[in-house]
Amino acid sequence: PATRNFTWDVEYIMWAPDCHQSVMIGINGEFPGPTISANAGDLIRVEVTNSLHTEGVVIHWHGIRQIGTPWADGTASISQCPINSGERFTYEFIADKPGTFFYHGHFGMQRAAGLYGSLIVNGTEQQPEPFAAEYDGELNMLLSDWYHENVYAQAAGLDGKDKHWEWVGEPQTILINGRGQFGCSLGITGDRRACDRRKRDALCKEGDKSERCELIRRSECGPFCERSQCSPVVFDVDPGKTYRLRIASTTSLSALNVQVQGHKLTVVEADGNFVAPFDVDDIDIYSGETYSVLLTTDQRASSSSYWISVGVRGRRPKTPPALAILNYTNSKPGRSSWPASVPPATPAWDNVTRSKEFTYRIKARDGTPTPAAAAVDRRITMLNTQDWVQGHVKWAINHVTLSLPATPYLGAYFYGIEDIAFDSSGESPDGYDRRYDIKKPPGAQAPAARVPTTASDRVFRIAHGAVVDVVLQNANALEEDVSESHPWHLHGHDFWVLGYGDGVYDHARDSRKLDTATPPLRNTVVLFPHGWTVLRFVADNPGVWAFHCHIEPHLHLGMGVIFAEGMEKLRELNVPREAITCGEAKTASLSLAPAV
Ligand code: C2O
Ligand code: CU
Protein backbone atom coordinates (compact mmCIF):
# COMPACT_ATOMS: atom_id res chain seq x y z
CA PRO A 1 0.00 0.00 0.00
CA ALA A 2 1.12 3.52 -0.77
CA THR A 3 0.78 6.79 1.11
CA ARG A 4 -1.13 9.45 -0.78
CA ASN A 5 -0.26 12.94 0.36
CA PHE A 6 -2.37 15.98 -0.26
CA THR A 7 -1.89 19.58 0.83
CA TRP A 8 -5.05 21.61 0.85
CA ASP A 9 -5.87 25.21 1.42
CA VAL A 10 -9.51 25.77 2.21
CA GLU A 11 -10.54 29.27 1.22
CA TYR A 12 -13.32 31.50 0.00
CA ILE A 13 -13.35 31.75 -3.75
CA MET A 14 -15.40 33.67 -6.26
CA TRP A 15 -16.86 31.14 -8.64
CA ALA A 16 -19.65 30.84 -11.15
CA PRO A 17 -20.77 27.20 -10.86
CA ASP A 18 -24.00 27.89 -12.73
CA CYS A 19 -22.81 30.92 -14.75
CA HIS A 20 -23.78 33.12 -11.83
CA GLN A 21 -20.91 34.33 -9.69
CA SER A 22 -20.95 34.02 -5.92
CA VAL A 23 -18.68 33.32 -3.00
CA MET A 24 -18.06 29.64 -2.30
CA ILE A 25 -15.75 27.54 -0.20
CA GLY A 26 -13.11 26.04 -2.44
CA ILE A 27 -9.95 24.00 -2.04
CA ASN A 28 -6.67 25.16 -3.57
CA GLY A 29 -8.58 27.77 -5.51
CA GLU A 30 -10.89 25.25 -7.14
CA PHE A 31 -14.46 24.10 -6.98
CA PRO A 32 -15.24 21.25 -6.55
CA GLY A 33 -12.20 20.27 -4.52
CA PRO A 34 -9.52 18.02 -6.00
CA THR A 35 -10.43 14.39 -6.63
CA ILE A 36 -8.66 11.99 -4.32
CA SER A 37 -7.90 8.71 -5.95
CA ALA A 38 -6.22 5.86 -4.14
CA ASN A 39 -5.98 2.10 -4.08
CA ALA A 40 -7.68 0.01 -1.43
CA GLY A 41 -5.37 -0.25 1.55
CA ASP A 42 -3.54 3.02 0.86
CA LEU A 43 -2.92 5.53 3.60
CA ILE A 44 -4.45 8.88 2.72
CA ARG A 45 -2.87 11.89 4.37
CA VAL A 46 -4.43 15.29 3.85
CA GLU A 47 -2.88 18.35 5.40
CA VAL A 48 -5.62 20.93 5.61
CA THR A 49 -4.90 24.60 6.16
CA ASN A 50 -7.89 26.68 7.09
CA SER A 51 -7.58 29.88 5.10
CA LEU A 52 -11.18 30.94 5.70
CA HIS A 53 -10.75 34.06 7.74
CA THR A 54 -14.01 33.94 9.63
CA GLU A 55 -14.80 30.36 10.54
CA GLY A 56 -13.44 26.96 11.53
CA VAL A 57 -13.47 24.01 9.20
CA VAL A 58 -13.43 20.19 9.23
CA ILE A 59 -13.56 17.67 6.40
CA HIS A 60 -15.46 14.41 6.53
CA TRP A 61 -14.54 11.43 4.34
CA HIS A 62 -17.96 10.14 3.52
CA GLY A 63 -18.11 6.33 3.34
CA ILE A 64 -14.63 5.74 4.73
CA ARG A 65 -15.13 3.72 7.90
CA GLN A 66 -12.15 5.17 9.79
CA ILE A 67 -11.35 1.84 11.36
CA GLY A 68 -9.22 2.67 14.38
CA THR A 69 -9.06 6.37 13.46
CA PRO A 70 -12.31 7.87 14.78
CA TRP A 71 -10.52 11.20 15.33
CA ALA A 72 -10.04 11.51 11.53
CA ASP A 73 -13.75 11.33 10.71
CA GLY A 74 -13.96 15.10 10.31
CA THR A 75 -17.13 15.95 12.22
CA ALA A 76 -17.06 19.17 14.22
CA SER A 77 -18.15 18.80 17.86
CA ILE A 78 -18.27 15.03 17.42
CA SER A 79 -14.91 13.62 16.40
CA GLN A 80 -12.78 16.74 16.57
CA CYS A 81 -12.42 20.43 17.28
CA PRO A 82 -12.92 22.65 14.27
CA ILE A 83 -9.63 23.66 12.66
CA ASN A 84 -9.40 27.33 13.53
CA SER A 85 -8.87 30.01 10.97
CA GLY A 86 -5.19 30.10 10.04
CA GLU A 87 -4.47 26.69 11.59
CA ARG A 88 -3.50 23.40 10.07
CA PHE A 89 -4.58 19.85 10.76
CA THR A 90 -3.57 16.58 9.16
CA TYR A 91 -6.06 13.79 8.51
CA GLU A 92 -4.61 10.32 8.20
CA PHE A 93 -6.69 7.30 7.45
CA ILE A 94 -6.77 4.07 5.49
CA ALA A 95 -8.84 3.77 2.33
CA ASP A 96 -10.17 0.52 3.71
CA LYS A 97 -11.92 -0.85 0.65
CA PRO A 98 -12.63 -0.08 -2.99
CA GLY A 99 -15.60 2.05 -3.90
CA THR A 100 -17.06 5.39 -4.83
CA PHE A 101 -16.92 7.94 -2.05
CA PHE A 102 -16.66 11.67 -1.57
CA TYR A 103 -15.61 14.16 1.05
CA HIS A 104 -17.24 17.29 2.38
CA GLY A 105 -17.24 19.93 5.07
CA HIS A 106 -19.05 18.87 8.25
CA PHE A 107 -19.26 22.10 10.22
CA GLY A 108 -22.24 24.43 10.02
CA MET A 109 -23.56 24.25 6.48
CA GLN A 110 -20.19 24.26 4.75
CA ARG A 111 -21.12 21.37 2.53
CA ALA A 112 -23.86 23.48 0.97
CA ALA A 113 -21.29 26.26 0.50
CA GLY A 114 -19.42 24.05 -1.94
CA LEU A 115 -16.86 22.33 0.26
CA TYR A 116 -16.76 18.88 -1.33
CA GLY A 117 -15.06 16.66 -3.86
CA SER A 118 -14.74 13.06 -5.07
CA LEU A 119 -12.87 10.28 -3.33
CA ILE A 120 -12.31 7.19 -5.43
CA VAL A 121 -10.78 4.01 -4.10
CA ASN A 122 -9.71 1.49 -6.71
CA GLY A 123 -9.76 -2.26 -6.31
CA THR A 124 -6.48 -4.12 -5.94
CA GLU A 125 -5.30 -7.69 -6.25
CA GLN A 126 -5.91 -8.17 -2.54
CA GLN A 127 -9.27 -6.41 -2.66
CA PRO A 128 -10.60 -6.93 -6.18
CA GLU A 129 -13.93 -5.71 -7.43
CA PRO A 130 -15.97 -8.57 -8.92
CA PHE A 131 -16.98 -6.57 -11.99
CA ALA A 132 -13.47 -5.23 -12.68
CA ALA A 133 -13.13 -7.16 -15.94
CA GLU A 134 -16.47 -5.98 -17.25
CA TYR A 135 -15.57 -2.42 -18.17
CA ASP A 136 -13.04 -0.59 -20.34
CA GLY A 137 -13.07 2.89 -18.88
CA GLU A 138 -14.41 5.05 -16.07
CA LEU A 139 -16.49 8.20 -15.88
CA ASN A 140 -17.08 10.13 -12.69
CA MET A 141 -20.09 12.22 -11.81
CA LEU A 142 -20.41 14.13 -8.55
CA LEU A 143 -23.88 15.59 -8.13
CA SER A 144 -24.87 18.52 -5.98
CA ASP A 145 -27.37 21.34 -5.81
CA TRP A 146 -26.71 25.04 -5.58
CA TYR A 147 -28.42 28.04 -4.01
CA HIS A 148 -27.85 31.66 -4.87
CA GLU A 149 -28.63 32.55 -1.26
CA ASN A 150 -25.44 32.00 0.73
CA VAL A 151 -25.34 29.43 3.52
CA TYR A 152 -25.04 32.03 6.30
CA ALA A 153 -28.34 33.54 5.24
CA GLN A 154 -29.82 30.06 4.89
CA ALA A 155 -28.70 29.07 8.39
CA ALA A 156 -29.84 32.32 9.93
CA GLY A 157 -33.26 31.80 8.38
CA LEU A 158 -33.50 28.26 9.73
CA ASP A 159 -32.45 29.48 13.17
CA GLY A 160 -34.99 32.31 13.17
CA LYS A 161 -37.56 32.37 15.94
CA ASP A 162 -41.32 32.26 15.41
CA LYS A 163 -42.22 34.42 12.46
CA HIS A 164 -38.56 35.03 11.68
CA TRP A 165 -38.16 31.43 10.68
CA GLU A 166 -37.29 31.35 7.00
CA TRP A 167 -36.72 28.49 4.66
CA VAL A 168 -34.76 29.19 1.52
CA GLY A 169 -36.84 26.81 -0.59
CA GLU A 170 -35.65 24.83 -3.57
CA PRO A 171 -32.15 25.20 -5.01
CA GLN A 172 -31.62 27.22 -8.17
CA THR A 173 -29.43 24.71 -9.95
CA ILE A 174 -28.37 21.07 -9.98
CA LEU A 175 -24.63 20.73 -10.58
CA ILE A 176 -22.78 17.92 -12.29
CA ASN A 177 -19.10 17.94 -11.31
CA GLY A 178 -19.70 21.45 -10.04
CA ARG A 179 -21.23 22.75 -13.25
CA GLY A 180 -24.73 23.85 -14.06
CA GLN A 181 -26.43 26.47 -16.19
CA PHE A 182 -28.78 28.87 -14.45
CA GLY A 183 -31.03 30.90 -16.66
CA CYS A 184 -29.17 30.01 -19.82
CA SER A 185 -30.73 27.03 -21.39
CA LEU A 186 -28.00 25.51 -23.47
CA GLY A 187 -29.41 26.84 -26.72
CA ILE A 188 -29.89 30.48 -25.93
CA THR A 189 -26.46 31.62 -24.95
CA GLY A 190 -24.85 29.44 -27.60
CA ASP A 191 -23.68 32.64 -29.25
CA ARG A 192 -20.01 32.96 -28.36
CA ARG A 193 -20.15 36.73 -28.64
CA ALA A 194 -22.03 36.63 -25.34
CA CYS A 195 -18.73 35.73 -23.66
CA ASP A 196 -17.30 39.17 -24.17
CA ARG A 197 -18.96 41.90 -22.16
CA ARG A 198 -18.60 44.51 -24.90
CA LYS A 199 -19.85 42.26 -27.64
CA ARG A 200 -22.53 41.00 -25.33
CA ASP A 201 -23.92 44.47 -24.95
CA ALA A 202 -23.99 44.80 -28.70
CA LEU A 203 -26.03 41.62 -29.01
CA CYS A 204 -29.03 43.24 -27.42
CA LYS A 205 -30.27 46.76 -27.75
CA GLU A 206 -30.70 48.65 -24.54
CA GLY A 207 -34.19 48.15 -23.28
CA ASP A 208 -34.66 44.89 -25.17
CA LYS A 209 -36.56 42.90 -22.59
CA SER A 210 -36.83 39.71 -24.64
CA GLU A 211 -36.15 36.49 -22.80
CA ARG A 212 -33.08 35.90 -24.90
CA CYS A 213 -31.56 39.25 -23.94
CA GLU A 214 -32.47 38.91 -20.30
CA LEU A 215 -30.66 35.59 -20.25
CA ILE A 216 -27.63 36.93 -22.03
CA ARG A 217 -27.39 39.83 -19.56
CA ARG A 218 -27.86 37.61 -16.56
CA SER A 219 -25.14 35.12 -17.43
CA GLU A 220 -21.84 36.29 -16.02
CA CYS A 221 -20.10 34.09 -18.49
CA GLY A 222 -21.96 31.87 -20.88
CA PRO A 223 -21.54 28.12 -20.75
CA PHE A 224 -19.77 28.15 -24.09
CA CYS A 225 -17.17 30.72 -23.26
CA GLU A 226 -13.56 29.78 -23.01
CA ARG A 227 -12.54 28.99 -19.44
CA SER A 228 -16.18 29.04 -18.47
CA GLN A 229 -16.80 27.55 -15.05
CA CYS A 230 -20.28 26.51 -16.04
CA SER A 231 -19.92 24.81 -19.39
CA PRO A 232 -21.68 21.47 -19.43
CA VAL A 233 -19.65 18.38 -18.62
CA VAL A 234 -18.81 16.32 -21.68
CA PHE A 235 -17.91 12.67 -21.21
CA ASP A 236 -15.94 11.48 -24.22
CA VAL A 237 -16.43 7.78 -24.89
CA ASP A 238 -15.48 5.34 -27.60
CA PRO A 239 -18.27 3.45 -29.28
CA GLY A 240 -18.71 -0.24 -28.56
CA LYS A 241 -17.15 -0.10 -25.10
CA THR A 242 -18.40 -0.53 -21.58
CA TYR A 243 -17.89 2.21 -19.02
CA ARG A 244 -18.19 2.33 -15.30
CA LEU A 245 -20.05 5.49 -14.44
CA ARG A 246 -19.54 6.48 -10.81
CA ILE A 247 -22.29 8.64 -9.40
CA ALA A 248 -22.22 10.28 -5.98
CA SER A 249 -24.68 12.77 -4.54
CA THR A 250 -23.75 15.43 -2.04
CA THR A 251 -26.83 17.57 -2.52
CA SER A 252 -27.97 19.84 0.25
CA LEU A 253 -31.60 18.98 -0.33
CA SER A 254 -32.52 17.35 -3.60
CA ALA A 255 -33.19 13.73 -4.33
CA LEU A 256 -32.18 13.11 -7.92
CA ASN A 257 -32.83 10.86 -10.86
CA VAL A 258 -30.13 10.15 -13.44
CA GLN A 259 -30.68 8.93 -16.97
CA VAL A 260 -28.41 8.49 -19.93
CA GLN A 261 -30.42 8.91 -23.08
CA GLY A 262 -30.75 5.69 -25.04
CA HIS A 263 -28.56 3.68 -22.68
CA LYS A 264 -29.38 1.02 -20.14
CA LEU A 265 -27.60 1.13 -16.82
CA THR A 266 -26.47 -1.91 -14.86
CA VAL A 267 -26.15 -1.15 -11.16
CA VAL A 268 -23.11 -2.89 -9.63
CA GLU A 269 -21.99 -0.88 -6.63
CA ALA A 270 -23.72 1.12 -3.91
CA ASP A 271 -21.83 3.06 -1.21
CA GLY A 272 -18.65 1.04 -1.73
CA ASN A 273 -20.45 -2.30 -1.59
CA PHE A 274 -21.19 -4.74 -4.38
CA VAL A 275 -24.79 -5.25 -5.32
CA ALA A 276 -26.39 -8.05 -7.31
CA PRO A 277 -26.30 -6.49 -10.81
CA PHE A 278 -29.61 -5.31 -12.23
CA ASP A 279 -30.60 -3.27 -15.26
CA VAL A 280 -32.53 -0.02 -15.17
CA ASP A 281 -33.35 2.90 -17.46
CA ASP A 282 -32.52 5.46 -14.78
CA ILE A 283 -31.52 5.56 -11.13
CA ASP A 284 -32.69 7.50 -8.13
CA ILE A 285 -29.98 8.83 -5.86
CA TYR A 286 -30.40 10.52 -2.49
CA SER A 287 -27.93 12.80 -0.79
CA GLY A 288 -25.16 10.73 0.74
CA GLU A 289 -25.53 7.79 -1.62
CA THR A 290 -23.11 6.62 -4.27
CA TYR A 291 -23.50 4.14 -7.12
CA SER A 292 -21.53 2.62 -9.91
CA VAL A 293 -23.41 1.68 -13.04
CA LEU A 294 -22.07 0.01 -16.17
CA LEU A 295 -23.15 1.40 -19.48
CA THR A 296 -22.30 0.15 -22.95
CA THR A 297 -21.84 2.60 -25.78
CA ASP A 298 -23.90 0.61 -28.24
CA GLN A 299 -26.03 3.41 -29.73
CA ARG A 300 -24.12 4.52 -32.76
CA ALA A 301 -26.99 4.43 -35.20
CA SER A 302 -28.82 7.71 -34.91
CA SER A 303 -26.63 10.23 -33.21
CA SER A 304 -23.16 10.59 -31.84
CA SER A 305 -23.96 12.34 -28.62
CA TYR A 306 -26.57 11.82 -25.94
CA TRP A 307 -27.94 13.77 -23.03
CA ILE A 308 -27.32 12.76 -19.47
CA SER A 309 -30.11 14.30 -17.55
CA VAL A 310 -30.37 14.73 -13.79
CA GLY A 311 -33.73 15.81 -12.43
CA VAL A 312 -35.30 16.36 -9.04
CA ARG A 313 -37.42 13.68 -7.36
CA GLY A 314 -39.78 13.78 -4.42
CA ARG A 315 -40.34 17.55 -4.30
CA ARG A 316 -42.40 19.71 -6.59
CA PRO A 317 -39.68 20.57 -9.11
CA LYS A 318 -38.68 24.20 -9.15
CA THR A 319 -35.14 23.33 -10.11
CA PRO A 320 -34.56 22.51 -13.77
CA PRO A 321 -32.74 19.27 -14.61
CA ALA A 322 -28.98 19.39 -15.03
CA LEU A 323 -27.51 18.22 -18.30
CA ALA A 324 -24.25 16.64 -19.34
CA ILE A 325 -23.23 15.08 -22.63
CA LEU A 326 -22.12 11.59 -23.46
CA ASN A 327 -20.06 12.15 -26.58
CA TYR A 328 -19.15 9.29 -28.88
CA THR A 329 -15.73 10.16 -30.23
CA ASN A 330 -16.09 8.26 -33.50
CA SER A 331 -17.38 11.15 -35.54
CA LYS A 332 -15.89 14.21 -33.88
CA PRO A 333 -12.90 13.21 -31.81
CA GLY A 334 -12.08 15.69 -29.08
CA ARG A 335 -15.08 17.83 -29.89
CA SER A 336 -18.61 17.48 -28.77
CA SER A 337 -21.71 18.39 -30.59
CA TRP A 338 -24.96 18.94 -28.75
CA PRO A 339 -27.33 16.07 -29.09
CA ALA A 340 -29.97 16.99 -31.60
CA SER A 341 -32.79 15.52 -29.58
CA VAL A 342 -34.66 16.76 -26.52
CA PRO A 343 -33.14 15.65 -23.19
CA PRO A 344 -35.04 12.81 -21.54
CA ALA A 345 -37.57 13.92 -18.94
CA THR A 346 -37.26 12.93 -15.30
CA PRO A 347 -39.99 10.58 -14.05
CA ALA A 348 -42.91 12.33 -12.32
CA TRP A 349 -41.54 13.89 -9.15
CA ASP A 350 -44.30 12.54 -6.93
CA ASN A 351 -44.23 8.95 -8.14
CA VAL A 352 -42.93 7.52 -4.86
CA THR A 353 -43.88 3.99 -5.88
CA ARG A 354 -41.35 4.17 -8.65
CA SER A 355 -38.64 5.33 -6.25
CA LYS A 356 -39.46 2.48 -3.90
CA GLU A 357 -39.34 -0.06 -6.71
CA PHE A 358 -35.82 1.02 -7.59
CA THR A 359 -34.66 1.11 -3.98
CA TYR A 360 -36.15 -2.28 -3.10
CA ARG A 361 -34.31 -3.93 -5.99
CA ILE A 362 -30.93 -3.25 -4.44
CA LYS A 363 -29.63 -6.50 -2.98
CA ALA A 364 -26.19 -7.71 -1.98
CA ARG A 365 -24.03 -9.40 -4.54
CA ASP A 366 -23.13 -13.04 -3.85
CA GLY A 367 -20.20 -13.20 -1.49
CA THR A 368 -21.18 -10.15 0.53
CA PRO A 369 -21.00 -10.85 4.27
CA THR A 370 -24.46 -11.41 5.72
CA PRO A 371 -25.60 -10.52 9.22
CA ALA A 372 -24.91 -13.26 11.72
CA ALA A 373 -28.00 -15.22 12.66
CA ALA A 374 -27.02 -14.55 16.27
CA ALA A 375 -29.25 -12.57 18.54
CA VAL A 376 -29.51 -8.84 18.19
CA ASP A 377 -28.19 -7.12 21.29
CA ARG A 378 -30.16 -3.96 20.99
CA ARG A 379 -33.02 -2.58 18.98
CA ILE A 380 -33.49 1.16 18.81
CA THR A 381 -36.59 2.64 17.25
CA MET A 382 -36.21 6.19 15.98
CA LEU A 383 -39.33 8.22 15.41
CA ASN A 384 -38.65 11.03 12.91
CA THR A 385 -40.69 14.14 13.61
CA GLN A 386 -40.66 17.83 12.94
CA ASP A 387 -41.75 20.05 15.80
CA TRP A 388 -41.53 23.47 17.41
CA VAL A 389 -39.03 23.84 20.23
CA GLN A 390 -39.26 27.17 22.06
CA GLY A 391 -40.26 29.02 18.96
CA HIS A 392 -37.81 27.22 16.68
CA VAL A 393 -38.59 24.65 14.03
CA LYS A 394 -36.60 21.47 14.63
CA TRP A 395 -36.38 17.91 13.43
CA ALA A 396 -36.33 15.35 16.19
CA ILE A 397 -35.70 11.70 16.94
CA ASN A 398 -37.92 10.29 19.67
CA HIS A 399 -38.81 13.90 20.50
CA VAL A 400 -35.19 14.90 21.00
CA THR A 401 -33.51 17.34 18.64
CA LEU A 402 -29.72 17.12 18.49
CA SER A 403 -27.77 20.10 19.73
CA LEU A 404 -24.03 19.63 19.50
CA PRO A 405 -21.79 20.50 22.47
CA ALA A 406 -18.81 22.85 22.39
CA THR A 407 -16.48 20.10 23.54
CA PRO A 408 -16.21 17.37 20.93
CA TYR A 409 -17.70 14.11 22.20
CA LEU A 410 -14.56 12.19 21.39
CA GLY A 411 -12.48 14.52 23.55
CA ALA A 412 -14.98 14.45 26.40
CA TYR A 413 -14.99 10.66 26.52
CA PHE A 414 -11.28 10.43 26.01
CA TYR A 415 -10.65 12.59 29.07
CA GLY A 416 -13.62 11.18 30.98
CA ILE A 417 -15.21 14.59 31.46
CA GLU A 418 -18.62 13.87 29.97
CA ASP A 419 -20.31 15.08 33.17
CA ILE A 420 -19.02 18.59 32.76
CA ALA A 421 -18.77 18.70 28.97
CA PHE A 422 -22.42 18.00 28.16
CA ASP A 423 -25.63 19.78 29.10
CA SER A 424 -27.76 16.70 29.31
CA SER A 425 -27.05 13.53 31.18
CA GLY A 426 -28.38 10.06 30.67
CA GLU A 427 -29.05 8.25 27.44
CA SER A 428 -31.14 9.09 24.44
CA PRO A 429 -34.52 7.32 24.49
CA ASP A 430 -34.54 3.90 22.75
CA GLY A 431 -38.04 4.28 21.36
CA TYR A 432 -41.25 6.27 21.45
CA ASP A 433 -44.74 5.94 22.87
CA ARG A 434 -46.79 3.84 20.46
CA ARG A 435 -49.84 5.98 21.03
CA TYR A 436 -48.15 8.59 18.83
CA ASP A 437 -50.00 8.73 15.51
CA ILE A 438 -47.45 8.91 12.70
CA LYS A 439 -50.08 10.13 10.25
CA LYS A 440 -50.72 13.35 12.17
CA PRO A 441 -48.64 16.45 12.91
CA PRO A 442 -47.30 16.68 16.48
CA GLY A 443 -49.87 19.32 17.40
CA ALA A 444 -52.77 17.08 16.40
CA GLN A 445 -51.80 14.16 18.64
CA ALA A 446 -54.14 12.83 21.32
CA PRO A 447 -53.24 14.34 24.72
CA ALA A 448 -51.70 11.08 25.95
CA ALA A 449 -49.29 10.98 22.99
CA ARG A 450 -48.35 14.64 22.97
CA VAL A 451 -44.70 14.66 23.98
CA PRO A 452 -42.88 17.99 23.90
CA THR A 453 -39.68 18.03 21.86
CA THR A 454 -36.53 19.05 23.69
CA ALA A 455 -32.98 19.86 22.60
CA SER A 456 -30.22 17.67 23.94
CA ASP A 457 -26.62 16.58 23.45
CA ARG A 458 -27.31 13.10 24.85
CA VAL A 459 -25.91 10.05 23.08
CA PHE A 460 -26.63 6.38 22.62
CA ARG A 461 -23.87 4.48 24.40
CA ILE A 462 -23.22 1.28 22.49
CA ALA A 463 -21.14 -1.55 23.94
CA HIS A 464 -18.18 -2.70 21.87
CA GLY A 465 -19.18 -5.58 19.59
CA ALA A 466 -22.93 -5.16 20.05
CA VAL A 467 -25.22 -6.05 17.18
CA VAL A 468 -27.62 -3.14 16.83
CA ASP A 469 -30.87 -2.96 14.91
CA VAL A 470 -32.24 0.46 14.13
CA VAL A 471 -35.84 0.94 13.10
CA LEU A 472 -36.26 4.29 11.42
CA GLN A 473 -39.89 5.26 11.75
CA ASN A 474 -41.09 8.16 9.67
CA ALA A 475 -44.00 10.35 10.74
CA ASN A 476 -45.89 13.40 9.64
CA ALA A 477 -44.09 16.75 9.57
CA LEU A 478 -45.58 19.97 10.99
CA GLU A 479 -47.83 20.42 8.00
CA GLU A 480 -50.87 18.16 7.57
CA ASP A 481 -50.39 15.22 5.21
CA VAL A 482 -46.71 15.92 4.68
CA SER A 483 -43.98 13.42 5.37
CA GLU A 484 -40.59 13.77 3.70
CA SER A 485 -38.00 11.28 2.51
CA HIS A 486 -34.86 11.30 4.66
CA PRO A 487 -31.58 9.72 3.58
CA TRP A 488 -29.95 8.51 6.80
CA HIS A 489 -26.19 8.22 6.87
CA LEU A 490 -24.08 6.37 9.42
CA HIS A 491 -20.49 7.29 10.13
CA GLY A 492 -17.82 4.71 10.93
CA HIS A 493 -19.68 1.68 9.56
CA ASP A 494 -21.63 0.08 6.81
CA PHE A 495 -24.98 -1.40 7.77
CA TRP A 496 -27.25 -4.00 6.31
CA VAL A 497 -30.57 -2.74 5.04
CA LEU A 498 -32.95 -5.41 6.26
CA GLY A 499 -36.17 -3.99 4.92
CA TYR A 500 -38.63 -1.22 4.26
CA GLY A 501 -42.36 -0.80 4.68
CA ASP A 502 -45.23 1.62 4.86
CA GLY A 503 -46.98 2.81 8.00
CA VAL A 504 -45.91 1.83 11.50
CA TYR A 505 -43.29 -0.86 12.00
CA ASP A 506 -44.77 -3.68 14.04
CA HIS A 507 -42.03 -6.01 15.19
CA ALA A 508 -44.25 -9.08 15.65
CA ARG A 509 -45.64 -8.73 12.16
CA ASP A 510 -42.89 -7.06 10.15
CA SER A 511 -39.73 -8.68 11.47
CA ARG A 512 -40.65 -11.84 9.57
CA LYS A 513 -40.43 -9.90 6.32
CA LEU A 514 -36.92 -8.66 6.94
CA ASP A 515 -34.23 -9.98 4.63
CA THR A 516 -31.20 -11.36 6.43
CA ALA A 517 -30.06 -13.50 3.49
CA THR A 518 -29.23 -10.90 0.83
CA PRO A 519 -29.51 -7.49 2.48
CA PRO A 520 -27.32 -4.87 0.82
CA LEU A 521 -24.55 -3.21 2.81
CA ARG A 522 -24.71 0.57 2.67
CA ASN A 523 -23.76 3.67 4.60
CA THR A 524 -26.83 5.69 3.59
CA VAL A 525 -30.42 4.53 3.35
CA VAL A 526 -33.63 6.30 2.55
CA LEU A 527 -36.61 6.48 4.87
CA PHE A 528 -39.71 6.95 2.74
CA PRO A 529 -42.63 9.22 3.70
CA HIS A 530 -44.86 7.73 6.42
CA GLY A 531 -42.82 4.53 6.24
CA TRP A 532 -40.10 2.61 8.04
CA THR A 533 -36.64 1.26 7.29
CA VAL A 534 -34.77 -1.32 9.36
CA LEU A 535 -31.00 -1.62 9.36
CA ARG A 536 -28.39 -3.53 11.32
CA PHE A 537 -24.80 -2.78 12.18
CA VAL A 538 -22.09 -4.32 14.31
CA ALA A 539 -20.52 -1.89 16.75
CA ASP A 540 -16.98 -3.01 16.02
CA ASN A 541 -15.32 0.38 15.60
CA PRO A 542 -14.80 2.31 18.83
CA GLY A 543 -15.46 6.00 18.32
CA VAL A 544 -18.15 8.64 18.45
CA TRP A 545 -20.21 8.42 15.30
CA ALA A 546 -22.93 10.57 13.87
CA PHE A 547 -26.03 8.96 12.40
CA HIS A 548 -28.11 11.62 10.69
CA CYS A 549 -30.28 12.73 7.85
CA HIS A 550 -27.98 13.81 5.04
CA ILE A 551 -30.18 16.72 4.03
CA GLU A 552 -28.10 19.69 5.14
CA PRO A 553 -30.92 21.86 6.55
CA HIS A 554 -32.43 18.85 8.34
CA LEU A 555 -29.13 18.09 10.06
CA HIS A 556 -28.82 21.76 10.90
CA LEU A 557 -32.24 21.56 12.56
CA GLY A 558 -31.15 18.64 14.74
CA MET A 559 -32.05 15.57 12.69
CA GLY A 560 -29.42 13.22 13.97
CA VAL A 561 -28.20 11.12 16.85
CA ILE A 562 -24.80 10.24 18.25
CA PHE A 563 -23.49 6.75 18.91
CA ALA A 564 -20.75 6.68 21.52
CA GLU A 565 -19.44 3.26 20.73
CA GLY A 566 -16.96 1.14 22.66
CA MET A 567 -15.94 4.07 24.84
CA GLU A 568 -14.25 1.59 27.15
CA LYS A 569 -11.75 0.96 24.33
CA LEU A 570 -11.08 4.57 23.49
CA ARG A 571 -7.91 4.89 25.51
CA GLU A 572 -6.33 2.11 23.47
CA LEU A 573 -6.44 4.31 20.38
CA ASN A 574 -3.80 6.72 19.34
CA VAL A 575 -5.71 9.99 19.23
CA PRO A 576 -3.73 13.09 18.28
CA ARG A 577 -4.33 15.54 21.10
CA GLU A 578 -4.81 18.55 18.85
CA ALA A 579 -7.87 16.84 17.39
CA ILE A 580 -9.74 16.89 20.66
CA THR A 581 -8.27 19.63 22.81
CA CYS A 582 -10.83 22.40 22.86
CA GLY A 583 -13.79 23.36 25.04
CA GLU A 584 -13.77 21.60 28.41
CA ALA A 585 -11.19 19.14 27.07
CA LYS A 586 -8.63 21.90 27.09
CA THR A 587 -8.55 22.14 30.86
CA ALA A 588 -8.85 18.40 31.18
CA SER A 589 -5.86 17.81 28.96
CA LEU A 590 -3.75 20.04 31.18
CA SER A 591 -4.79 18.50 34.47
CA LEU A 592 -4.90 14.83 33.50
CA ALA A 593 -1.90 12.61 33.09
CA PRO A 594 -1.37 11.77 29.44
CA ALA A 595 -3.38 8.74 28.39
CA VAL A 596 -0.87 6.85 26.37
CU1 C2O B 1 -21.79 12.95 4.33
CU2 C2O B 1 -22.28 13.18 8.35
O1 C2O B 1 -22.10 13.13 6.30
CU1 CU C 1 -34.19 14.72 6.48
Image (cartoon, rainbow, N blue to C red):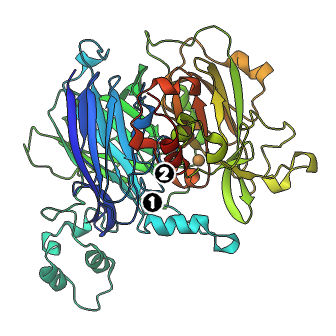
Drawn side of residue 107 relative to residue 480, left or right:
left
In the picture of the structure, the residue carrying the numbered disc 2 is 254
Mark nearer the N terminus (1 vs 2) = 2
Seen from the viewer's position, the closer of residues 378 and 517 is 378
Please tell me in which quadrant of the rendered image residue 285 appears: top left
Judge whether 26 appears above or below 369 on screen. Answer: below
Q: Residue at x 27, y 12 (%)?
A: 126
Q: Amino acid at mark 2?
A: Ser
Quadrant of the rendered image containing residue 473: top right
Q: Quadrant of the N terminus?
A: top left
Name the residue rendered at 65%, 30% in the picture.
461
Q: Is residue 236 left or right of residue 378?
A: left
| Position in image of residue 596 (x %, y %) | 43, 27
| Residue position for label 1 | 319
Please name which of the two marks, 1 or 2, marks the residue nearer to the observer.
2
Can you say whether 327 is above or below 108 in the image? above
Report how far apart the C-alphas of labels 1 and 2 lie in the structure: 9 Å
- Looking at this view, is 285 or 543 the one in front? 543
Q: Position of residue 246 (x, y in %)?
A: 31, 34
Choose between 437 and 495: the one closer to the eye.
495
Q: Residues within 10 Å of mark 1 (few under 14, many from 20)?
A: some
> Given contact means CB atoms under 8 Å apart, are the residues at marks 1 and 2 in contact?
yes
Residue 302 visible in rendering: no
What amino acid is labelled 1 in the image?
A: Thr
Q: Residue at x 59, y 36 (%)?
A: 416
Indicate the position of residue 280 as horizontal and vertical percent values.
42, 30
- Look at the numbered disc 1 and say if its residue's Cβ is closer than 8 Å to ligand 2: no
